[in-house]
Amino acid sequence: METLQIGGVSARQLADNFGTPLYVYDEDKIIAQAKDAMENFSSDMFKTEVAYASKAFSSIALFKLLAAQGLGFDAVSGGELYGMSRAGVDMSKVYFHGNNKSNKEIEEALELGVGYFVIDNVMECRRLIEIAMEKHIQTKALLRVNPGISAHTHEYIMTAKPDSKFGIFIDDTEHIGQVIELLAESSHVRLAGFHSHIGSQIMDARSFEKAIDTMTYFLAYVQREYGMEQTELSIGGGFGIKYLEEDQPISLGQMCKTMVKYTERCIQEKDISISKLITEPGRAMVGEAGYTLYTIGDRKRSGTKDYLFVDGGMSDNIRPALYDAGYRAVLAEKYKEPAWHTYCIAGKNCESGDVLIDTIKLPEAKSGDLLAVYSTGAYGYSMASNYNRLGRPAVVFAGHGKARVVIRRESYADQYDLEIE
Ligand SMILES: *Cc1c(COP(=O)(O)O)cnc(C)c1O
């Protein structure tokens, strides 16, 4: 009987030592992804930066791991900034995103010495200028522009429609001009460049090339119109990963290389200058490195469905219920055996929509078997909840045959710690 290994540790051993449900990251895979991105996202024509979009999975252990590989970080809240600062990351390599940063968050970010504010709208721009002036802190900004590219992905996670809540639409030259002029007058906030992010789980490089093409046209316009030079350009993240057998993503390194080459070509053709190119992979950095282990409990036949119930559910993975996201999974101790039986994997949360995998073929399963769901490393733990007071699972990093807990399991008491009786 061959058992699935994660980072050189058997899934059974992980489950026995740390309990289930359990998030397990293959640490070696994360490091390999980081290296692949860093090595391939580089150019002789401009500086480059890979900033990990921490909303995909934020933990102090991960921040330390990625900072050691030279990555920068994206944050979208004071809470994420706090974690980065506790992890000791170089805050000058942090990009502070978000479409409604509070004054408090802006103050905190300035005090922490965050490298860049990614400005979403004119009101935020005014608030940032005012707060930076009051605090006598100098900082840099990028303006988020929505290039209006529709990528082939699920509608709910597509951000670059003309009516998106993110950024200023590329044709809205009035508001873009306002931000540029406000920042040109500011003695504390310097507009370093522009940012765009077209969506998530995008598999084809063409969508990114279209975005780069559009954004470099846009840079040519602002360089001509406003005399900006040496502009920085962030092309966001959104690189697809393998969830289902049929998903055929391009590797992160290949995607990085393609984007750098394409940007080099665009700036030559358009005769513009950029000083730095930035990319912000989230999902692609951690998604495939993550697995969730569940113990199978009861089985039930209900109408046409043969249910396998697991000891977690939508409280540790909301994506199937939220986006109809698909996953593949195996029985960890029978993962090489032929899969004849069709099952529906449902969680234990009180929602009929709490189905992790609607239809999956597995070997015959019995109570106590270990189910390993693949590619749960992104937007799993970070979107987890306490729904039904199921404590959030522990997170384990496994690598080189060793495993360590990086986030402990949430106890009953942890969940009631905030209550005042
Ligand atoms: C979500 C997000 C990312 C990362 O997206 P992934 O799909 O996880 O790669 C990068 N940049 C911005 C601005 C984002 O909102």
Image (cartoon, rainbow, N blue to C red):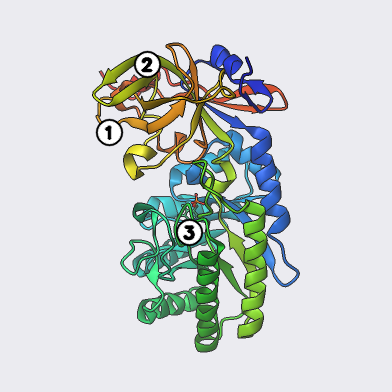
Mark 1 and mark 3 lie on one chain; the one further toward the N terminus is 3
Three-letter amino acid code at the position of disc 3: Lys
Residue corresponding to mark 2: 412
The quadrant of the image that shows the N terminus is top right
For marks 1 and 3, give the CA distance. Answer: 49 Å
Mark 2 element type:
helix
Where on the picture, by quarter, is residue 153? bottom left
Pair 1/2: label in front: 1
Residue corresponding to mark 3: 135
Q: Is residue 81 left or right of residue 71?
A: left
User: Which numbered marker is on residue 353?
Assistant: 1
> 346 above or below 121?
above
Q: Residue sitting at 55 percent across and 21 percent down?
A: 332
> 326 above or below 253?
above
Mark 3 element type:
helix
Three-letter amino acid code at the position of disc 1: Gly
Q: Position of residue 363 (x, y in %)?
A: 49, 21
For marks 3 and 2, give the CA distance. Answer: 42 Å
Mark 1 and mark 2 lie on one chain; the one further toward the N terminus is 1
Mark 1 element type:
loop
Where on the picture, by quarter, is residue 272? bottom right
**Label 1 crowd (10 A; few <14 / some 14-19 / many >=20):** some
